[in-house]
């Protein structure tokens, strides 16, 4: 029972709830930015570099081999797929990450600036009251000026 109560207190703390909301919104925001990168940013970049689709870039390390059959149609060796190093997909994911990270940075910066503007400036500290000695010296100075 005590463990359940402690868990409830932990789960209802502001930090945990805020973090959960942040993760959910971050996931949705990531999808939006990924679509922006894939559908808006990458096509012009691909066009600039000669109509290349980055996800199609790969280095074929071993060519595909067709199936070998004898005259009777019996399969002697199975077909094998090509062994490729898909560096284009890695480039695409890297571009996605850089743009998503930059967008999140700008969003956080915008929120920070908005938060700074909302907070009122701290009031200037009030002048301390003069001591009795200072008041007495001020009165003496004023009397000397009048003579």
Image: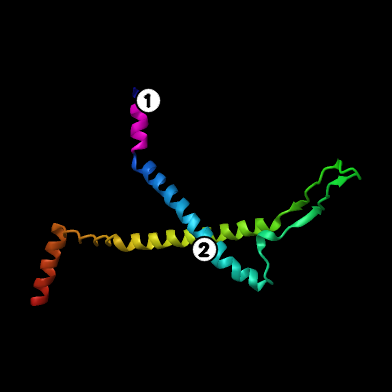
Magenta stretch containing residue 6, yes or no?
yes
> Is 142 positioned to the left or the right of 33 in the image?
left
> Is 71 positioned to the left or the right of 101 in the image?
right
> Is 83 positioned to the left or the right of 117 in the image?
right
**Residue mark closest to the camera, 1 vs 2:** 2
Magenta stretch containing residue 63, yes or no?
no
Within 10 Å of disc 1 (Cα), the crowding (few <14, some 14-19, many 20+) is few
- Give how far across and how far down residue 69 sits, in percent: 87, 45
Secondary structure mostly seen in the magenta stretch: helix
Looking at this rendering, what residue extends furthest in the front direction?
A: 72
Which of the two labelled residues, at mark 1 and mark 2, occupies the earlier sequence position?
1
- The residue that label 2 is drawn on is 36
Cα–Cα span, label 1 and label 2? 45 Å
> Is 6 positioned to the left or the right of 88 in the image?
left
How many marks the image carries: the answer is 2
- The residue that label 1 is drawn on is 3
Within 10 Å of disc 2 (Cα), the crowding (few <14, some 14-19, many 20+) is some
Identity of the residue drawn at 87% across and 46% down: 68
In which quadrant of the rendered image does the C terminus lie?
Answer: bottom left
**Range of magenta residues:** 4-12
- Give how far across and how far down residue 52 sits, in percent: 68, 67
Which one is in front, 101 or 62? 62
Q: Quadrant of residue 115?
A: bottom left
């Amino acid at each position: 029972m005590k463990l359940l109560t402690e868990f409830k207190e932990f789960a209802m703390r502001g930090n945990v709830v805020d973090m959960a909301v942040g993760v959910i919104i971050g996931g949705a925001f990531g999808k939006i930015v990924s679509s922006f990168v894939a559908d808006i940013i990458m096509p012009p970049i691909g066009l600039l570099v000669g109509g290349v689709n980055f996800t199609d870039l790969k280095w074929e390390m071993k060519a595909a081999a067709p199936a070998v059959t004898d005259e009777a149609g019996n399969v002697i060796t199975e077909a094998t797929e090509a062994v490729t190093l898909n560096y284009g997909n890695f480039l695409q994911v890297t571009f996605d990450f850089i743009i998503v990270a930059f967008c999140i940075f700008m969003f956080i910066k915008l929120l920070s600036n908005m938060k700074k503007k909302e907070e009122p400036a701290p009031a200037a500290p009030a002048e301390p009251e003069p001591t009795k000695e200072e008041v007495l010296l001020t009165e003496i100075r004023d009397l000397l000026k009048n003579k």
